[in-house]
Image (cartoon, helix red, strand yellow):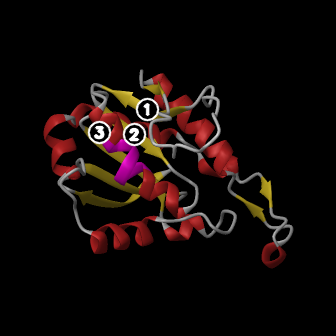
Amino acid sequence: MKIAGRYSFNGGAEAVQIHYPKLLGEIETAIDGVDAHTHKTKESKEKTMRGTMLYSPRDLNESFKREFAKLGWTSVRVHCDYSKDFYVADRPAQRMVAGAFREMDFIKEKLGVEVQFGKYAFMVYNVCAKMTIFRNLGHIDTGVEIVPVKAFADQMSSGVSYFEQFVWDLETRGISNIDIPVLVLGIDHE
């Protein structure tokens, strides 16, 4: 795979280049190590493209896991204790949700990486919520979000979001005082 687009959210590109140049090289190596063409394995059942072979997000994610693991990156999972303090007084007692957690795909030296081939909401959640949470918990201080560009997303199931849409929304949303620096990388299969 290759990097086809770069977007600096809240100074993310500069932060990664200044503080994590070696790790940026590892991220580029991991991306380059994924052979997208071996993951065009999903036969579409969608009405508009029934029978068409598409790229499998699940298979691509597994390939990214292998490539990042080779370079010593690890996922980090944090347990979530949900409070009952905010229930109204007449609400019946609820049991705690067992096994609730949040997980970041890859972390190394306080740089967090998320790879997202899902719906738009997940991209926004990663950059505007999850990365801030992981920063607040002391796991990261800067993030990298890896997403497909439109030409690549068009060869996946409908609903997969893409770099161009994500950048427009982040630009239009603006930066909040709680946002961390994030480099958004748009990737393509060619």
Q: Nearer the viewer, residue 116 or 92?
A: 92
According to the picture, the residue beneath numbered tag 3 turns out to be 24
Q: Amino acid at mark 1?
A: Phe
Please give the name of the residue rendered at 60% of the width and 63% of the height, measured from the top-left corner.
Answer: 160
Q: Helix or strand or loop: what does disc 1 sit on?
A: strand
Q: Residue furthest left?
A: 18
- Where does residue 187 sit, x and y in percent of width and height? 46, 56
User: What amino acid does circle 3 point to?
Assistant: Leu
- Examine the structure image and report whether residue 151 is included in the region drawn in magenta: no
Query: Would you call the spot at circle 3 few (<14 residues within 10 Å), some (14-19), or many (20 or more)?
Result: some
70 horizontally vs 139: left or right: right
At a point 47% along the width and 33% down the height, the residue shown is: 83
- Point out residue 132 in the picture as x, y percentages from the top left corner: 31, 43
CB atoms of marks 1 and 2 within 8 Å: yes
Do callouts 1 and 3 mark residues in contact (Cβ within 8 Å)? no
Which residue appears at 64% of the width and 29% of the height? 95
Query: Magenta segment, principal secondary structure?
Result: helix
- The image quarter containing residue 168 is bottom left
Question: Taking 144 as reference, is 107 above or below it?
Answer: above
> Which stretch is magenta?
126-132
Kindly identify which residue carries mark 1.
106
Residue ID at (37%, 54%): 185
- Which residue is tagged 2? 113
Q: Give the CA separation, mark 1 to mark 3.
A: 13 Å
Query: Which amino acid type corresponds to the residue marked 2 in the rendered image?
Result: Val
Give the secondary structure at mark 3: helix
Q: How far, Cα to Cα, is label 2 from label 3?
A: 10 Å
**Front label number (2 vs 3):** 2
In depth, the one of 35 and 129 nearer the eye is: 129
- Can residue 8 be seen by looking at this rendering? yes
Please rate how many residues cluster around mark 1, counting C-alpha atoms within 10 Å: few if below 14, some from 14 to 19, many from 20: many
